[in-house]
Image: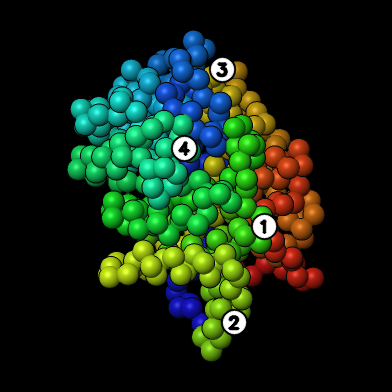
Amino acid sequence: MTDTHVRPIRLLHHDTAERPFIVIWEVTRACQLVCTHCRADAIRTRNPFELSTDQGRKLLDDLAAFGTPRPLVVLTGGDPFERPDLPELVAHGTGLGLSMALSPSVTPRLTREVLVELHDAGAKAISLSLDGASAATHDAFRGVDGVFDDTMIAAKMVREVGYRLQINTTVTRDTVHELPGILKTVLELGTTLWSVFFLVPTGRGKLLNALTADEEEEVLHWLHDVSDLVAIKATEAAHYRRIAIQRADVDDSTDLDTAFPVGPLRASLREATDEVLTGEEPRRRRPRAPLDVNSGRGFAFVDHVGLVYPSGFLPVSVGSVHEQPFSEIYREAQLLQELRTPDLFGGRCGHCEFRAVCGGSRSHAYAVTGDPLAEDPSCAYQPSSDSVLAVQ
């Protein structure tokens, strides 16, 4: 049995109905890339109705007013580096005691000078996207030639300036076999966290091929296999937590591959992983347990004009910071309260014994059915007849 002192998932120590763990603020939708999977239909120029500097400060004031532990704040886009007041916003949030992170696009705006300025203002972490193991794949995904090579340069600068580096990877049926190669690069770059995004068919992403539920299950098991190499976050795949619990519950006398038979996709990923890491001796670490956070339950998204959503991939607005403080919206919005009540979920999710710590991807449910409370079609798990939840 897995060490009983190590939980297979991490539980928050505060009530997610009262305060979020993380808030993503889309400070602008302007971006010079044309990524094929973009949820935002990014535009070339800034929207004149974006939250102003003063309105942004007010939003950050409200986030800080939640008190300790204050939410983590990620400034994203579009490309947040399109905003000239970004250092001012970062400094303001830092001064309030907020942990500020950035998710820029790799464009000519991402320079060492700007990275230093934002680091001096208090930004602690930066996430960059890497969606292919080669320039051909990544550049096609991003819609701009040369961006793969620029991303390698940017990642090294990010580390040199002193940031924690997160790599974000969107996985589709067309790119899934490149994951081992991407993993190799992730390790070479000294990445702190690898966030693997499972495609939600929204925005431009509707034109891409998402994994089937069975394929996603195989990829999640593979990610767990390699989670002793780098901390991993499975974005829009809440059932990664269910898999972590199931694997931790396997008796030491039982082989994991016996408990969870390996399909052709996972076998292929394992073989490719062995190939790309041949001769390497990567540092092994205790896997970082996935965190129990979900859309509206510890997580919220504010768009460039101040509308609040459960997630950037779940385009159902629950209010506007122009009309109501974010803190009130987060605590009182009906949909957010429903998303924090897993017994309200439909289909398999509502009967699943893991519903309180998984809850499924609400974004996938909405994208496919139009109902954010429906069962998650990207999960292959069939709940047991006994729906009592047991978390180690």
Q: Residue 198 location in percent, x, y?
A: 56, 49
Identify the residue position indicated by label 4 in the image.
Answer: 140
Taking depth in this image into account, of 171 and 384 the one nearest to the observer is 171
Classify the position of the C terminus by image quarter: bottom right
Q: Which tag, 4 or 3, sits closer to the chain's start?
A: 4
Identify the residue position indicated by label 2 in the image.
Answer: 258
Work out whether 198 lies above or below 261. Answer: above
For badge 3, the amino acid type reads: His
Q: Which mark is residue 213?
A: 1
* Marks 1 and 4 close (CB-CB < 8 Å): no
Does dot 3 land on a helix, a strand or a loop? loop
* Marks 2 and 1 close (CB-CB < 8 Å): no
Does dot 1 land on a helix, a strand or a loop? helix
Separation of marks 1 and 4 at Cα, in angstroms: 25 Å
Q: Residue 323 location in percent, x, y?
A: 60, 18
Separation of marks 4 and 3 at Cα, in angstroms: 38 Å
Q: Residue 18 location in percent, x, y?
A: 56, 42
